Amino acid sequence: MDRSLKYSCIFMCMNIIMLLPAFSYSQTLVSKASFYSTSDGMGTPSGACGYGDYGKDVNNGEVCTASRRLYRNGAGCGACYQVRCKNNALCSEEGTKVVVTDSADGQETDLILSYKAYAKLAKTPSLAAHLCGKGVVDIEYRRVSCGYGGNLMVKIHEDSKYADYLAIVVLNQGGATDIHAVEIYEEESEQWISMRKAYGAVWDLSSPPCGDLKVRFLTSTSVESKWVQSDKAVIPAQWKAGLTIETDIQLT
């Protein structure tokens, strides 16, 4: 494809993305939730977001699988939700906060929580077993900030092959902000090059530019859509698979 046509198509796509309605983070939704079990009650490293071990341990293992409606082809990865069960006899008023790390549709459920997160819905630990015995419960939930306090991080995916193929996983994105596009700056052409959404929170690019790489992200909240980028190069020239880099970007 002609380079000018390629970037015209990218620009048009970005405009379409910006016109999509943003999620209302203050809106409380009603649905059902269930849970899944692992050996330690935490998340799983094989979730659809591509987080690996981060998806197992983030938020102390209080994570969830989201329905396709919330997952949104990976744009919902890293989102945080405050979830409250509506069974007043068993459930606490506050509920618990979960992070989306996976995608699956359950029976009338928007969220399938890790066992550890699901048990936190109960008023007391002694009531958690009774709650889990129900299997599925009515809930209220709303989008919130994760409250990590740290900056956005980029991990070089294990499938990356220096210097022919670069894949990155976006971590610690804040919870109330979606990421719709990722671009890398090419010094030689003085142009931003779009990375492909591989799946979940994983973005990739064949034949990436050489040298230290600047990265920018198209983000959206309920208030605005905008590009954000680090003041310094994010990916070092001699990058390697498994490397995790903290940026100077902080998202809510």
Image: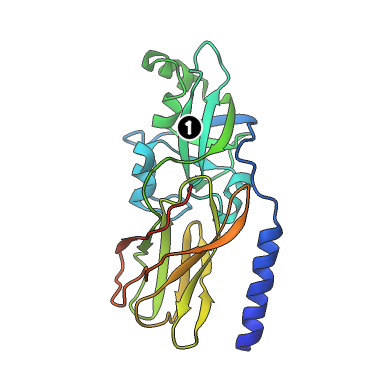
Determine the secondary structure under disc 1.
Answer: strand
Q: Which amino acid does label 1 sit on?
A: Phe
In-front residue for pair 138/227: 227
Q: In this view, does 147 lie above or below 139?
A: below
The percent coordinates of residue 24 (x first, y second) are: 64, 41
222 relative to 238 in the view: left or right: right
Q: Is residue 159 above or below residue 138?
A: below
Q: Residue at x 43, y 79 (%)?
A: 208
Q: Which residue is drawn at 50% across and 17% down?
A: 91
The percent coordinates of residue 95 (x first, y second) are: 48, 24
| Picture quadrant of residue 123 | top left
The percent coordinates of residue 119 (x first, y second) are: 42, 24
Q: In this view, does 65 lie above or below 241?
A: above
Q: Which residue is drawn at 39% across and 30% down?
A: 116
In-front residue for pair 106/73: 73
Q: In this view, does 156 lie above or below 142?
A: below
Question: Which residue matches tag 1?
Answer: 35
Quarter occupied by the N terminus: bottom right
Q: Residue at x 31, y 68 (%)?
A: 241
Q: How crowded is mark 1: few (under 14 residues within 10 Å), some or many (20 or more)?
A: many
The percent coordinates of residue 12 (x first, y second) are: 69, 72
Number of numbered discs present? 1
| Picture quadrant of residue 86 | top right
- Colour scheme of the rendered structure: rainbow
In-front residue for pair 146/73: 146
